[in-house]
Amino acid sequence: MFFRLSILIFLSSTISGLAQPLPDCRYDDVPTYHQELSDWQISLLDTIYKLSPTYQPTDLIKVSEAGFGSEKEVRQLMLADLQALNDAARAAGMFLEIQSAFRSYGYQEQTFQSWVNQDGLEAALKSSARAGHSEHQLGTAIDFRSASGPAAWELEDWATTPEGAWLKEHAWQYGFVMSYPKNKEAITCYIYEPWHYRYVGREIAQKLKDSGLSLREWLWQAQ
Ligand SMILES: [Zn+2]
């Protein structure tokens, strides 16, 4: 009996997580497994998995609290690291600003629709998330730009500007990861977004850096 149970546990633990291949880039609306506000580090969001429309952090604060000019909002739990990142950037002569941060389900619906109107559905699906699928709904994702520049997506490759390059190099030290890196479109299911960072905390950011995995691959294993 106990033997059978342990076999069962062994089987189910190998079936979930690592043993499964990463799903293809298809479009679906499957509720993501980890939807508690305390699950912010491991909530997997992609073109398949989504948050419910009512998911909304209760601890949002303005990024001006971390020394930015913007009044966009993020979760309070990341404030100290966001401030540390901004301080380090400024000490290195880099002036970052925040283009976008928390976006509610309803706001994301509008955002996605505006990209559809501008670029058509096919292109919008690759550059923007449908409502519920956006990391911005977590309140822990930020679209950065250079303080002196336009929205980063208006540039050829923001990561080649001084601010973008600095962030690419140092973001992990403060717990941030670039969710959609270059040449990983087939894995992340989105175009290269050198401006979009998700806060996962310093420990996981370090593990991710050491693993060489993209955030989606790592989160898939962590489910
Ligand atoms: Zn973004």
Image (cartoon, helix red, strand yellow):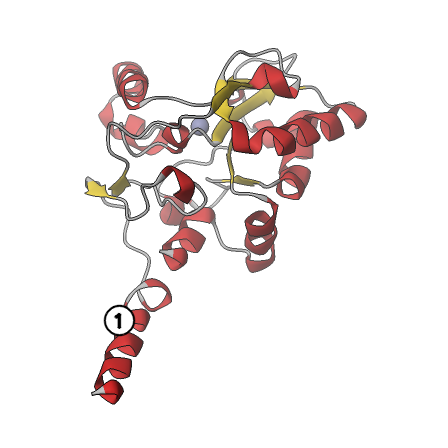
Visible in this render: residue 203?
yes
Badge 1: residue crowd in 10 Å (few <14, some 14–19, many ≥20) = few
The quarter of the image holding the C terminus is bottom left
Visible in this render: residue 195?
no
Which residue is at the front of the view, 20 or 9?
A: 9
Taking the image as shown, residue 194 lies to the left or right of residue 126, namely: right
Q: Residue at x 57, y 48 (%)?
A: 205
Residue 199 in the image: state x and y as whole percent: 52, 37
Taking the image as shown, residue 89 lies to the left or right of residue 121, namely: right
> Which of the 4 image quarters holds residue 22?
bottom left
In the picture of the structure, the residue carrying the numbered disc 1 is: 12
Q: Is residue 81 above or below residue 188?
A: above
Q: Is residue 68 above or below residue 167?
A: above
Which residue is at the front of the view, 199 or 40?
A: 40
Q: Residue at x 41, y 36 (%)?
A: 191
- Badge 1 marks a residue whose secondary structure is helix
